[in-house]
Every structure is written in C-alpha cells, then in structure tokens.
Image (cartoon, helix red, strand yellow):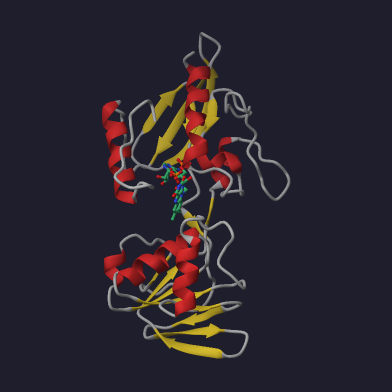
Amino acid sequence: MGNVPFVSNNPKPTRNEALEYYRRVAQSFNLNINLFEEVIQVDRGQLTDDSRTSFTVKTSKSTYSCNNIIIATGFYDIPYLLNIPGEELPKVTHYYSDPHFYAFQDVVVVGAMNSAVDAALETYRKGANVTMIVKGDSIGSRVKYWVKPDIENRIKEGSIKAYFNASLKEIRPEDVDIETPDDLITLKNDWVIAATGYQPNLRFLEQVGIELSSDEVRCPTINQDTHETNIPGIYLAGVICGGMNTHRLFIENSREHAVKIMKDIAP
Ligand SMILES: Cc1cc2nc3c(=O)[nH]c(=O)nc-3n(C[C@H](O)[C@H](O)[C@H](O)COP(=O)(O)OP(=O)(O)OC[C@H]3O[C@@H](n4cnc5c(N)ncnc54)[C@H](O)[C@@H]3O)c2cc1C
C-alpha cells in the first residue's frame, strides 16, 4: 500500500505480520486516526463559495465539517445471529481472535466458511476439543484453497469432529443441543464460536442518502471510475462497495479504490 514494502517470512503473511504492516503504513504517512469514535450521522450543508457541498459529520465524541467523505465501513460490525435460546450467554461469541484462550476446553464452532475453519483449526492446534456444526453437507467451497485440504483432512482423521447437515438448537451453560440428520445430540461444552457471517450496515448508507440497488445485493450506487456515490463529495471504499455481496471484495482487490478516489478528490 502506498509503495510501502510488505516483508513476510512466510509464503502467506500471518495475521500478526499484516497488523504490523498496517500500523507501519499508518505511521509512515502520519495518518490522523481517531480511534473508538463512531460516526452517528452525516448531514449535507449549503454549497460553499467554490460550489462544493459542505458536510457535517456527527460522531460519538465530536462534530466535524468537511467537503469530502470516504465511507469504508466494511461488514464486520453486525453478525448474523443464530436466533436460538442461549445465544446471549457469555460463553457465545461471534468474534473469534485468540486460540490460546480455548486451550484444553470443549469448543463448538458453528459454520463452514473461512472464519469458522480458521477458528476450528487454530483452537484445535492450541489443544481445544473442537466440534464443528455445519448447515450444509461439506466445508464451504470459498474457503481459502490452501486451507481447505487441512480442515478436510483433520475432519477425516477425526482430530476435529464435524456434524454436517446439522444445526445448533439450544445453548446452555454446561452443554449444547445439536440437531443432526439422525438424532438430537447433547454435547458437553465450554465455548461456542458462532462464525455465521456478518452483514454490512446498509441502513447507515441509506441514512446518509446513498442509493442502493433494488435487488437482493443492494449494491450502493457508485461511479466505477471514481467511487463517488450519487451524493457528490461522498465516496465508498472497500467491502461496502459490494453491498450484500461481502465475499466479492477483499483486501487485494480493494486497494485500488483509494487510488481512484484520491485521483478524483486531489488530482
Ligand atoms: C476471519 C476473516 C479472515 C479474512 N481473511 C482475509 C484474507 O486472508 N485475505 C483478504 O484479502 N481478506 C480477508 N478477509 C477480508 C478482509 O478482512 C476484508 O476484505 C477487509 O477487512 C475489508 O476492509 P474494509 O476497509 O472494507 O472494512 P473493514 O476492515 O471491516 O473496516 C471497517 C471499519 O469501519 C469501522 N466502522 C463501521 N461503521 C462505522 C461508523 N459508523 N463509524 C466509525 N467507524 C465505523 C469498523 O468498526 C471497522 O473498523 C478476512 C475477513 C475475515 C472476517
């Protein structure tokens, strides 16, 4: 990014290497980052002397004025819920990060896409007793091609237990109920990692006045060359550009968004 080299000791960079790199990019460009501050509302003001719209951005901490806004809100803040009894228990999480936390304990992982597979493999390798609960009959076809054989072989050899065509029915402090094609199974359980996916906050875009397509993808309106929305001065970058199609854009193919936007804002 920004011509800052990314050095890795591995064929694929690890999460920690990526985080080091991103922080270094931010420091290199001396970016002004206001952490733990949520944008609540964006209001359009009057045209300025040079015929540009001014915006007022209200946040959880302050209010700002600006002529351009780039919205890059991703899709990670609103998880798809299981909507079953016990989901509110403190042992249930939709956000997995540290595998060591789960060592030597009984972990249920719900899902079969990238997040679920990463959580299952990593916690298993730190000593957790892992059971996957998969809605369909196989591991997701979009799981990273270099990871998929690993999880499939761990399931085949029995190191990680997996119930296919199955769903979690109830979570209790000591155990969980799993509906399988054969039976309702009760399993002793310490933690549930519900890797059931996330949805973008499209309501926020609508509140700002950005138009979304009427089909189920609900794609925001943007000019593909500049990433400007139907509101002059407001741009979109990253995963949010894909609407509900959250798997279409990822880090590698979103990096060009910022370049296009900045060419339009500051040619
Ligand atoms: C488990 C997992 C593994 C992944 N692995 C890979 C991988 O190996 N390679 C790859 O290319 N991609 C991977 N991805 C996808 C990658 O994380 C996303 O493509 C990328 O993070 C999207 O960047 P973004 O800037 O669009 O959104 P995000 O990275 O989601 O950033 C959005 C930010 O906006 C903040 N925000 C939202 N609303 C507001 C608001 N109202 N006010 C203020 N801030 C707000 C959010 O809190 C968040 O910090 C993975 C994703 C997951 C979940």
Residue located 52% across and 64% down the image: 196
Pick whichever, 35 or 103, lies toward us: 103
Please say if 100 is above or below 209: below
Pick whichever, 215 or 157, lies toward us: 157
Left or right: where does residue 139 sit relative to residue 9? right
Pick whichever, 77 or 256, lies toward us: 256
Please say if 20 is above or below 121: above
Count of picture labels? 0
In percent of width and height, residue 62 lies at: 35, 35
In percent of width and height, residue 138 lies at: 59, 70
In percent of width and height, residue 234 lies at: 54, 28
Residue located 60% across and 35% down the image: 209
Please say if 59 is above or below 259: below
Q: Quadrant of the N terminus?
A: top left
Left or right: where does residue 182 sit relative to residue 175? right
- Quadrant in the picture for residue 24: top left
